[in-house]
Image: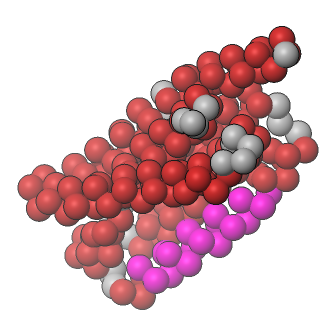
């Protein structure tokens, strides 16, 4: 039995975004140390902490509103907003030159990731096929992991060939284009809703 179409769309949506982000992730520390004025290992560590703290705060806040306030259509819309915020944060690295730029963009990335992640996880839990929960969560994990693995192997080579600015631009652009996957996701949710009403 294959996963239903909503689950397939959710996996494709998240895999495309996570893979795009992985283009720059393996060499991000090199970028900070070599391309940011005053960049150092300490700056990288602090920037990572800022990302995790901003993500954690925004994740809990957005999760509450997703559960209590948002319709399924609004959940898809919120995931798109989060995706665009993440894409913007990567695009702005093209002009980043100071540690505070990195800190601000990491905070923005963390917030955007939380806004994207909360509705995706909510919808995945809602539409997962009963009796196949472990397999479909595993399929989600494997898909995103393999997407990251492939992109990471390509990202370093792209930086060598094109430079950091180009790869940040490619990453941000690819993430924004990935938001178009939400159109298929919304369509499949609408179909599933109509089918459940008929039944």
Q: Residue at x 51, y 51 (%)?
A: 139
Residue projecting furthest to the left: 161
Residue 138 occupies quadrant: bottom right
Closer to the camera in the image, 109 or 99: 109
Q: Which residues, given as a range, are shown in magenta?
A: 44-61
- Quadrant for the C terminus in the image: top right
Magenta region includes residue 162: no
Q: Residue at x 42, y 43 (%)?
A: 16
Counting from the top left corner in percent of width and height, residue 127 is at 72, 37
Color theme of the render: secondary structure
Q: Is residue 113 above or below residue 35?
A: above
Closer to the camera in the image, 38 or 189: 189
Closer to the camera in the image, 33 or 70: 70
Residue 96 occupies quadrant: bottom left
Residue 176 occupies quadrant: top left
Q: Residue at x 65, y 72 (%)?
A: 53
Q: Is residue 93 above or below residue 128?
A: below
Residue 164 visible in this rendered orientation of the protein: no
> Is 14 on the left-hand or right-hand side of 170?
right
């Amino acid at each position: 039995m294959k996963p239903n179409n909503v689950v397939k769309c959710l996996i494709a949506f998240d895999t495309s975004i996570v893979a795009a982000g992985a283009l720059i992730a393996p060499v991000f520390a090199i970028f900070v140390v070599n391309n940011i004025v005053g960049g150092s290992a300490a700056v990288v560590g602090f920037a990572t902490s800022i990302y995790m703290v901003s993500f954690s705060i925004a994740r809990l806040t957005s999760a509450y509103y997703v559960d209590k306030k948002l319709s399924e259509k609004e959940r898809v819309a919120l995931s798109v907003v989060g995706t665009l915020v993440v894409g913007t944060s990567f695009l702005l690295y093209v002009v980043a030159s100071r540690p505070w730029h990195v800190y601000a963009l990491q905070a923005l990335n963390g917030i955007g990731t939380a806004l994207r992640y909360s509705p995706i996880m909510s919808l995945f839990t809602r539409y997962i096929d009963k009796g196949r929960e472990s397999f479909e969560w595993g399929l989600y994990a494997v898909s995103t992991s393999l997407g990251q693995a492939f992109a990471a192997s390509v990202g370093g080579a792209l930086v060598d060939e094109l430079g950091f600015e180009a790869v940040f631009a490619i990453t941000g652009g690819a993430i924004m284009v990935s938001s178009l996957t939400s159109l298929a996701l919304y369509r499949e949710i609408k179909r599933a809703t109509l089918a459940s009403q008929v039944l």
